[in-house]
Amino acid sequence: MIILNDLTYVYRKGAEALCNASASIGGGVYLLLGENGAGKTTLLHIIAGLLYPSKGECSLDGYNISERRPEIMRSIFFLGDNMKFPFVSIEEMVKCHAPLFPTFDAEMLRSNLARFGMTGKERLRKLSLGNRHKAQLAYALSLRTAVLLFDEPANGLDIPSRQQLQKMIAECVTEEQTVIVSTHIVSDLRNLYDGVLVLSRGKLLLADTVDSLLGRVSFTVTSVPPVAPLYMERRFNSFHAICNVADAEESCDVDYELLFNALHHNVKL
């Protein structure tokens, strides 16, 4: 369980990237949403132990992540956008880096790489951006850490590779693991999300599970405006709305873009 307690981060020049963020994040795959500069990458860096909070605390299973204890650091892995691995190949990464993670699964790595047509012997520097990212994703998932953090994991991937990534996450991630995916393209892994975090200008507007959210509100698409929606947008010839559960005749899956826009219009859900 990840606990954020009044988490605040202020950069040296005074810019506040996070402001009093509090949340409890359990197992499952969480979507992290926010506009550019909302504080998403800063939050991931703090959870990964790469940044110290200016105020408040981020803990994992009761341990303050900022203390960077070995038993905590080996439970977390962060894969950033355009991140470079410091080894020639994934094979070398396994020899030098994987021993630090007792949950590493070599068979899972072989299977993941095979999905992308790789062996792990490929020189990372000679791969295209997309293929290098595929190799990194295959490796990250095979570490099987309690916490796995992705910043734009589908960047540079073609359509078939995005579909393979969705299958890999569904098959590799257990209910006990916590995976946080920061992305602007919500459709790639839409069917996998168990929860959602929404940031705006450093403030955490929402931290909830999908089941809890759908227990309060419904997402509807109708040809005529629904009665008393909490929030509504017209898209072409249909009305996309968020309504109280009791007021909705039928419900769709969570529309994350609609949810994001509603929260930015200060709608209370």
Image (cartoon, grey):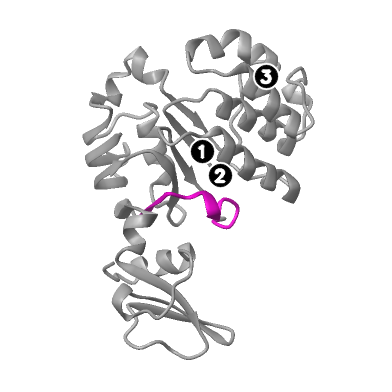
Give the number of the disc on residue 152. Answer: 2
- Above-or-below relation of 237 to 174: below
- Pointers 2 and 3 in contact (C-beta within 8 Å): no
Q: Secondary structure at mark 2?
A: loop
Q: Specify the segment rendered in magenta.
A: 186-199
Residue 63 included in the magenta stretch of the image: no
Q: Is residue 200 visible?
A: no
Q: Which residue is mark 3?
A: 90
- The answer to which of 1 and 80 lies nearer the viewer is 1
The crowd level at tag 2 (other Cα within 10 Å; few <14, some 14-19, many 20+) is: some
Mark 1 touching mark 2, by CB under 8 A? yes
Q: Is residue 176 above or below residue 28?
A: above
Image x and y of residue 243, in percent:
35, 76
Q: CA distance from mark 1 to mark 3?
A: 18 Å
Q: Would residue 148 appear left or right of 118 to someone viewing this image?
A: left
Q: Answer with the quarter of the image where residue 200 lies.
A: bottom left
Image x and y of residue 123, in percent: 76, 20
Q: Residue 61 in the image: x percent, y percent? A: 27, 27
Amino acid type of the residue that numbered disc 2 sits on in the rendered structure: Glu
Tag 3 or tag 2, which sits nearer the N-term?
3
Looking at the picture, which amino acid does disc 1 mark?
Phe
Question: Which SS class for mark 3?
Answer: helix
Q: Check residue 150 in the rendering and tell me which mark sits there, or answer none.
A: 1
Question: For the residue labelled by badge 1, is the local secondary structure a helix, a strand or a loop?
Answer: strand
Quadrant (top left/top right/bottom left/bottom right) for the N terminus: top left
The Cα atoms of the two marked residues, 1 and 2, are separated by: 6 Å
Please give the name of the residue rendered at 38% of the width and 71% of the height, measured from the top-left corner: 218
Spatial CA span between label 2 and label 3: 20 Å
